[in-house]
Amino acid sequence: MVKYTAIAAPLGSVGFVASEEGLREVFMTRRGVDRCLDWLRRRYPGGQRERGLLATFQEQLRDYLAGRPVRFDVRVDLGGLTEFQQQVLAACAEVDYGKTATYGELARRIGRPRAARAVGAALGRNPVPLVVPCHRIVGCDGALVGFSAEQGLRVKRWLLELEAKGKAGVGNTTPGLGPIPKP
C-alpha cells in the first residue's frame, strides 16, 4: 500500500508518496496543501494519507525549502524505471548543491556522450525531484530548459537561486540519497 502526504512550501505545496521500498514520488504544485492532497487521493485511490510519513525527510525538505543546504537521507523507490533512467538519476544525484551541469555532461558521466536528449527525457520522468536534483541540469549554453514541476522554469530558477543563497559561507554540501540502484 502506498502512503502520501503534503506540506506547505514557499511556492505552494509539495506532496510525496512512499511505498514500502521508499520514497516513490515528489510532486510540487502552486496549489495549497488541501488541493495537493485531493490530487494525491485521486492519483492513488488505494493509498492512505499519513501526516508523519517519512518524518525525517519532511524535516529535511522544510530545511531545504528554507534555504539551508541539506543532505537528503531517504530511501527511494525507482521501481518501474528503465536501467538507463536509473543511471541518469544516479548521475544527477551526484551534482553538488549550488552547482549545475549540462545534459551533455550528464550523458558523458554515464558513458553515453551522444545521449544528451535521452538524458533530458529521462530527467523529465524523474519521480523524485529535489531528492534527485534535476533542477541543477541546464542546457549546453547554461540556459534554463525543461523542468517537470508545475510552473516549470519559474520553479527551476527559484530553486537554483535558493541554493545560490544557501551555499554562501556554508561550503559545498552534496544532497545524498538512500540507495539508488546502480544497474
Image (spheres, rainbow, N blue to C red):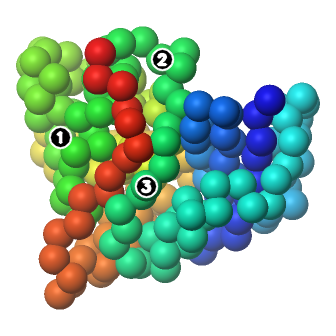
Badge 3 marks a residue whose secondary structure is loop
Marks 1 and 3, Cα distance to the nearest angstrom? 25 Å
What residue type is disc 1 on?
Thr
Badge 1 marks a residue whose secondary structure is strand
Q: Is residue 145 left or right of residue 124?
A: left
**Image position of 62 with respect to 150: above or below:** below
- Quadrant containing the N terminus in the rendered view: top right
Residue 14 location, quadrant: bottom right
What residue type is disc 3 on?
Asp
Marks 2 and 1, Cα distance to the nearest angstrom? 22 Å
Q: Name the residue carrying label 3.
A: 73
Circle nearer the viewer, 2 or 1: 2
**Image position of 127 with respect to 36: above or below:** above
- Quadrant containing the C terminus in the rendered view: top left
Task: Tell me which label, 2 or 3, sits earlier in the chain.
Answer: 3
**Foreground residue, 134 or 94?**
94
What residue is drawn where x is 11% and y is 34%?
A: 105
Q: Name the residue carrying label 1.
A: 102
Q: Residue furthest bottom?
A: 169
What residue type is disc 2 on?
Leu
Task: Tell me which label, 1 or 3, sits earlier in the chain.
Answer: 3
Residue 167: percent from left, percent from top: 24, 77
What residue is drawn where x is 23% and y is 34%?
A: 91
Using a 10 Å C-alpha cutoff, classify the residue at mark 1 as few (fewer than 14 neighbours), some (14 to 19) or many (20 or more).
many
- Does the image show residue 153? no
Badge 2 marks a residue whose secondary structure is loop
Q: Residue 81, which numbered label?
A: 2
Residue 153: percent from left, percent from top: 44, 52
